[in-house]
Image (cartoon, rainbow, N blue to C red):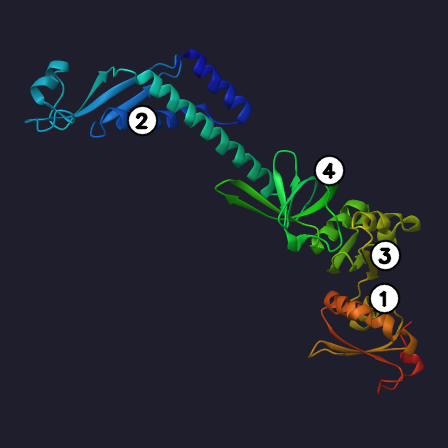
Amino acid sequence: MNIDFIEALDQIEKEKGINKEVLLEAIEAAITSAYKRNFGSAQNVKITIDRETGEVKVYSLKNVVEEVETDLLEISIEDAKKIDPNYENGDIVEELVRPKNFGRIAAQTAKQVVVQRIREAERGIIYNLYVDRVDEIITGIVQRKERANVFVDLGRTEAILGSSEQMIGENYNHGDRIKLYIVEVKKTTKGPQILVSRTHPGLVKRLFELEVPEIFDGIVELRSISREAGSRTKIAVYSNNEEVDPVGACVGHKGARVQQIVNELKGEKIDIIKWSENPKDYIASALSPAKVLLVEVNEDSKSAKVVVDDYQLSLAIGKEGQNARLAAKLTGWKIDIKSRSQSDLMIQEDDIIE
């Protein structure tokens, strides 16, 4: 090692952000281990690297004693005083040694340490880059499929789209550019592992934040969301400004805003309803596109009985119960839907929800 080596470490510090002193200390420790491995593990040694020239020096460390029992570890008080009259019992003498072929071992060890530390630093940088982006959207390019998993190139690293996080019926072909929701970033022995999703409700929420400025600015709030990925999503929105229609803001001019999100989700239907603190109004809206006649609520059990016209019953329940299921999840209420002819509730014209 020489001054070129020190200059190389300076360059690594600038490019990779790894402190040069930390690298040198790690190299010194590694070379010490290499020395003991190659020149006798019983010997106490200290390795130093000159910070300016890169010169490596090896010192044998010996305890000053009255009577020597082990030459490799101890030195007599008489011999110690020949080196320096100030030495006393219990002191440690450092003797410069020059083992043969040590330069090659030191250089090889230093290279291994630097490569390892660079790899660790890069992994740390990538982890820190993505760990703060959990619950956010990221765009990636489909690289390959392995078993049921899809691996997505994010630029500096890859993300894993697990089978349970893939939308039913959606194909992931090499080179496809897709938006993903970051679910978790984990540290592993092979580096950071980034787990992403196409099915998480948070993906829809973040897409609306990107597409609707009023949500991003906090004028419109997305209060609740329920989703069956690839099929249908319901969102409840609320406006903090009476002059701003929250549903209209999310739909956009001629449906442009919501259509962008539907396209990104490959045709997934999205129902946008107005959130209300009145549970009757909220539940009625949540069952959209069905028209609800009457909602009777039980606050204690947080359950509701809903009445619709006979011809609206199948629409209110939805295919395989999907509409009712999503509405219940959106509102947090248990919903029992009956047709007008099935219901035992008395419906007055004044009770009908407009």
310, 16: nearer the viewer: 310
Q: Pointer 4 and pointer 3: residues touching (CB < 8 Å)? A: no
In the rendered image of this protein, does residue 253 appear above or below residue 293?
above
* Left or right: residue 351 compared with residue 191: right
Q: Nearer the viewer, mark 2 or mark 3?
A: 2
Residue type at mark 4?
Answer: Gly
Q: Is residue 122 left or right of residue 28?
A: right
Quadrant where the C terminus sits is: bottom right
Q: Earlier in the sequence, mark 1 or mark 4?
A: 4
Q: Residues within 10 Å of mark 1 (few under 14, many from 20)?
A: some
Provide the secondary structure element on which disc 3 rests. helix
On residue 34, the disc is 2
User: Which of the 4 quarters of the picture holds residue 199?
Assistant: bottom right
From the viewer's perspective, is residue 306 above or below residue 73? below
Q: CA distance from mark 4 to mark 2?
A: 47 Å
Label 3, on which residue?
A: 247
Give how far across and how far down residue 227 sits, in percent.
Answer: 74, 60
Residue under the point 73% across and 49% down: 206
Q: Which mark is residue 123?
A: none
Of pointers 4 and 3, the one earlier in the residue sequence: 4
- Dots 1, 4 in contact, CB < 8 A: no
Q: Mark 4 = which residue?
A: 175
Q: Position of residue 115 (x, y in %)?
A: 46, 27
Mark 4–mark 3 Cα distance, whole angstroms, equals: 35 Å
Q: Amino acid at mark 2?
A: Ala
Packing grade of label 3 (10 A; few <14, some 14-19, many >=20) is some
Q: Do we see residue 225 in this rendering? A: no
Q: Nearer the viewer, residue 178 or 256?
A: 178
